[in-house]
Image (cartoon, rainbow, N blue to C red):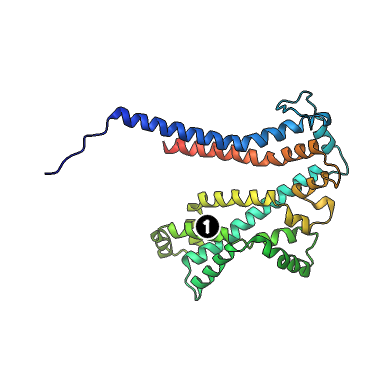
């Protein structure tokens, strides 16, 4: 004779749900503090005079508030931080747009076009994801030097277009789209390129936005490759440019923190804009 279990008590289910929510909130709070504490310390140090950089006690709020660190780097002719900021913005934006164009085209070809060796070639590309990026520094540098692109923005931009992750990411998204939409467009006389631009790309806006964010952040924070390619001080981007504030024997920590705060401004603005867009989209769905 089959036995039935008594139904779970509603009060016990609510209690477990409350405990799970509290644990999740505690975990998210801990992760948030791990991110915010260094950021707050950076901002605090950027507003401290030199005499307060190495006090034995911790002061989150500066005892003496000063703009000296910001003024010293913004008004320093030997430290063109505004020029570096503009260079970083232009380079990151250009790399992001080109990567989106190249990777989406390549991904659509791997997802929809039939050609000999497609699977083998794509598997070979995926295999390069398991190789550390530092392995490509010397070959890429020799290639850029052979083309005569040292101390040139072409030498910074071109290797960034050969990323495999974006192709893999976009291909997986295109594979998830129903083929019936594209087949209907082709029956109506659309070419393969028109199907890509008018059907696939508009549907891929969420994936393109995600890839764009990842690409922009990577290009904005890139330190080693621009440092190797760019020798002219006026051509530097922010990460290698701020490196000049750290000498062999002394480091201007206040100025470094002020420069890091300026570097973080576009990232914070991007987060705020995306957060607002996400909130609007959620309200529309509701």
Which residue is at 73% across, 55% downward? 224
Q: Position of residue 123 (x, y in %)?
A: 52, 68
Which residue is at 49% across, 71% downward? 119
Which residue is at 72% across, 25% downward? 61
What is the tally of numbered marks visible in this picture? 1
- Residue corresponding to mark 1: 169
In this view, the residue farthest toward the right is 77
Rendered-image quadrant of the N terminus: top left
Placement of 278 over or under 216, stated as above or below? above
Placement of 279 over or under 184, stated as above or below? above
Q: Is residue 89 left or right of residue 285?
A: right
Q: Is residue 268 left or right of residue 173?
A: right
Q: Nearer the viewer, residue 194 or 262?
A: 262
Image quadrant assignment for residue 12: top left
In this view, the residue farthest toward the left is 1
Q: Secondary structure at mark 1?
A: helix
Q: Nearer the viewer, residue 52 or 185?
A: 52
Q: Nearer the viewer, residue 177 or 248?
A: 248
Placement of 61 over or under 83, stated as above or below? above
Q: Position of residue 163 (x, y in %)?
A: 61, 61
Q: Position of residue 200 (x, y in %)?
A: 48, 57
In this view, the residue farthest toward the bottom is 116
Which residue is at 72% across, 37% downward? 261
Mark 1 neighbour density, 10 Å: few (under 14) some (14–19) many (20 or more): some
Q: Is residue 283 left or right of residue 1?
A: right
In this view, the residue farthest toward the top is 63
Q: Nearer the viewer, residue 142 or 85?
A: 142
Q: Position of residue 162 (x, y in %)?
A: 63, 63
Rendered-image quadrant of the C terminus: top left
């Amino acid at each position: 004779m089959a036995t039935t279990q008594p139904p779970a008590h509603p009060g016990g289910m609510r209690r477990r749900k409350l405990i799970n929510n509290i644990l999740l909130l505690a975990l998210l709070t801990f992760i948030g503090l791990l991110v915010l504490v260094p950021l707050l310390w950076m901002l605090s140090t950027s507003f401290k005079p030199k005499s307060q950089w190495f006090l034995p006690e911790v002061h989150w709020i500066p005892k003496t508030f000063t703009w000296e660190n910001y003024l010293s780097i913004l008004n320093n002719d030997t430290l063109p931080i505004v020029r570096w900021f503009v260079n970083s913005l232009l380079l990151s934006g250009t790399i992001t747009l080109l990567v989106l164009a190249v990777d989406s085209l390549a991904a659509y070809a791997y997802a929809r076009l039939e050609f000999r060796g497609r699977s083998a070639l794509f598997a070979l590309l995926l295999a390069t994801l398991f190789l550390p990026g530092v392995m490509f520094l010397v070959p890429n540098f020799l290639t850029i030097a052979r083309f005569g692109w040292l101390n040139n923005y072409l030498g910074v931009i071109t290797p960034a277009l050969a990323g495999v992750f974006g192709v893999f990411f976009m291909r997986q998204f295109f594979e998830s789209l129903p083929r019936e939409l594209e087949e209907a467009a082709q029956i109506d006389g659309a070419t393969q390129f028109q199907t890509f631009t008018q059907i696939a790309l508009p549907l891929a806006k969420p994936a393109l936005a995600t890839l764009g964010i990842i690409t922009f952040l990577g290009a904005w924070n890139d330190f080693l490759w621009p440092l190797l390619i760019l020798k002219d001080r006026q051509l530097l981007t922010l990460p290698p440019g701020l490196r000049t504030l750290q000498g062999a024997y002394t480091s201007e920590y206040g100025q470094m923190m002020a420069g890091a705060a300026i570097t973080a401004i576009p990232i914070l603005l991007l987060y705020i804009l995306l957060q607002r867009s996400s909130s609007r989209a959620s309200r529309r769905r509701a």
